[in-house]
Amino acid sequence: MTARDAARGARLVLHQLEYEQRTFWRTPQAVFFTFALPVLMLVVFATLNSGYKVSVFQGRRFVEYFVAGMLAFGSISATYGNLAARLVFRRESGQLKRLRATPLPASTYLAGIIASSVTVSVAVSAVVLTVGRVFYDVSLPASLLRLIAVLIVGSGAFCALGLALTTFIPNTDAADATVFGTLLPVLFISGVFQVVPTGSLMDRIAALFPVRHLVRATLDVYAGEPFPWLRLLAVVAWGAFGALIAIRRFRWSPR
């Protein structure tokens, strides 16, 4: 590949990213649920548990623990959930099939939609951090760069898992049920909404899934612990697994 080809490919990805961003922001329902749900849950749970402290989080306030959990939840929702549902709708409505007949390379299209999902994930994280700081006096982590790195790696991995999930969703009607059915139970046992005792049965089960590792990595960064390389490695491994499934099974045409 020449430098000119690489530059042209980059321009196409940026163009697709711009298109995906315009599409997202012009869909009020998607914007509302993607941004409002983590903030609403933060307000409700932080208010209900305002007097609690979390021993597994260096004795800090529950709201600080919950902000870290909502950062992981927002990133996963903006990537795994939204990406899977959007692609299934486009596949079953014939949009992806028509796209394959255009000169746009498939890799460029997927790169653009993944980049858009990661961008939305970062925006959701910024909103959660702002709400936590302004309304609940939650301090920012010592290193924002480390937090951004953790969230971007997690977002990329869950984009790959979202792509893989589309291959198991037969039609549009099954999209939301499949997304929430595979995600919500893991969110609960992974300590996103409440503290899961370390070493408990739920904790050991959750350790098999990437959500737990992303949540713990976010908590480690927030608490000023050493960079969570091993936890991120587990998340990346799951992302690679999802990418492999997507490469082998991804369909552009409806059933």
Image (spheres, rainbow, N blue to C red):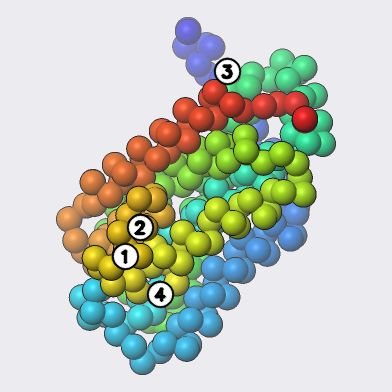
Cα–Cα span, label 1 and label 4: 15 Å
Query: For the residue labelled by badge 1, is the local secondary structure a helix, a strand or a loop?
Result: helix
Q: Which mark is residue 201?
A: 1
User: Of the residues under marks 3 and 2, which one precedes in the sequence?
Assistant: 3
Kindly report which numbered mark, 4 or 3, lies closer to the viewer in this rendering: 4
Does 116 sit left or right of 2 as displayed? right
The quadrant holding residue 234 is top left
Q: Residue at x 63, y 22 (%)?
A: 106
Mark pair 2, 4: CA separation: 16 Å
Are the residues tagged 2 and 1 within 8 Å (C-beta)?
Answer: yes
The answer to whether marks 4 and 3 mark residues whose Cβ atoms lie closer than 8 Å is no
> Above or below — where is 204 with respect to 1?
below
Residue depth check, mark 1 versus mark 4: number of the one nearer the observer: 1
Q: Name the element at disc 4.
A: loop
Mark 3 burial class by Cα count in 10 Å: few <14, some 14-19, many 20+: few
**If you read the primary sequence from the N terminus, does the residue marked by circle 1 or circle 4 appear first?**
4
Residue 159 placement (x, y as % from top left): 52, 41
Q: Which residue is mark 4?
A: 194
Mark closer to the observer (3, 2): 2
Q: Mark 2 — residue?
A: 205
